[in-house]
Image: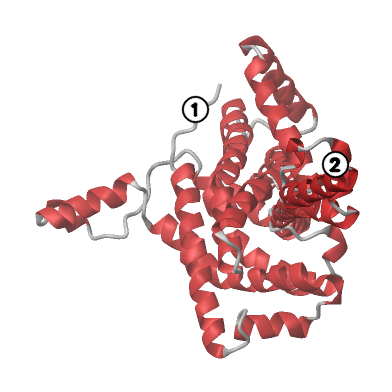
Amino acid sequence: PHQATNMLRAACALRAAPRACAGSLHRAPPAVARASCPAGSRGSLLRPAARQLSTAAAEEAGLLARGQFDAGFFQGTALFAGVVLGAMAASDEQRASAINGLLAGFRSLGVSDRISDRQLIEDFLRKNVAAAANVVMASPVFYFLFAGITGESVVVSSLRAITGTMRIVPFMGAFYGLFAVCSPFLVDFFMARGQGYEEATGTAGLAMILSGFVAIEAVVELRGCGVLFSQMTAASFAIFIPALIGRLACGVLLQQQKTGSSEEASLLPASWQEGPTWQAHTYMLFDQLHIGQDFAVTTCGTTVFQYILNAVTFVLLTKGRSSSLGDMARFMVGGMGGTLGSGMAQFGKTLFMRTGFGFAWNLASSQPVQMP
């Protein structure tokens, strides 16, 4: 009887073992489960879940890395939030006091009455603040399209639209802040030598762009696209800065000067306003969307320069400090595929990129400036 009983228990244990190893460990006491399942079998039950967790964590980390969530993004986001909250919290009296202090500072440092207080406030302080805000608002389009034309997915491109925009906030603040502070002195200097106000303003803008300000814009461009300071090389700036000067002349100065102005020469003949219905509606649509000559200059005039800038940026992103001028030249000719057809396709993508960004930027610059 004892032998029969032992055999029956053994048979029951054998029948319970497969169920326990298949994931029904909660149905058997722990001791039976441990006895029924070898150590290797118990470990194998946990490995798939562990692998899934580690894979999900790796994918999340990889997505964050490809989306370029770095220190620059968090610094820019903190600065952006601080500026917005500070501007919202400031009272009208505090804003007026700050403006009066700036005007007193300009006068004490030598800006003459050839430039009125109203011009100092509207044409230098307020316009540059609005111009910086316009760039920030239009930048997500730029970084989304840049990531897209260099082969990234829609998800990664969307993330880079955000991270790239936030990463340039400190540099945009420095760029337009220095423009607002330094320009009055240069305008006053050129007016003292016989230039009118409008001519002196344009001359001062070119002088500032050709000075050290182009270096700030170069850092804005590269950092926004995710290039680290450790990846930048002196040789790359030999190509980057001349192309950037051309793009700035066609883009930044034009959009900065037109900030707050809705007047723009149309691309369509004036006769279309009184023409057939489709012509009149097309003219009205172009006028409402501010698709005019400024948009065309900003888009087409900057595409060639942008193509060169894209080549330098992409090579630095992929090869870092090991990149050479030959690598950049090969990208300009052959694009991402290394063939003439690929290069032509890449140029077409750059034109599409500049069209999207130019439209967003020009539309923002054409809106009336509403600031205290």
The secondary element bearing badge 2 is classed as: helix
Side of 371 relative to 70 (left or right): left
Picture quadrant where residue 121 is located: top right
In the rendered view, tell whether residue 294 sits above or below residue 259. below
**Visible residue check, residue 111:** no
In the rendered view, tell whether residue 89 sits above or below residue 38. above
The secondary element bearing badge 1 is classed as: loop
Whichever of callouts 2 and 1 sits on the residue coming sooner in the sequence is 2
Q: To which residue does mark 2 refer?
A: 32
What label does residue 177 carry, if any?
none
| Image location (x, y in percent) of residue 231 | 84, 65
| Image location (x, y in percent) of residue 101 | 74, 20
User: Which corner quadrant holds the C terminus?
Assistant: top right
In the rendered view, tell whether residue 350 sits above or below residue 127. below
| Image location (x, y in percent) of residue 168 | 71, 47
Picture quadrant where residue 107 is located: top right
Q: To which residue does mark 1 refer?
A: 370
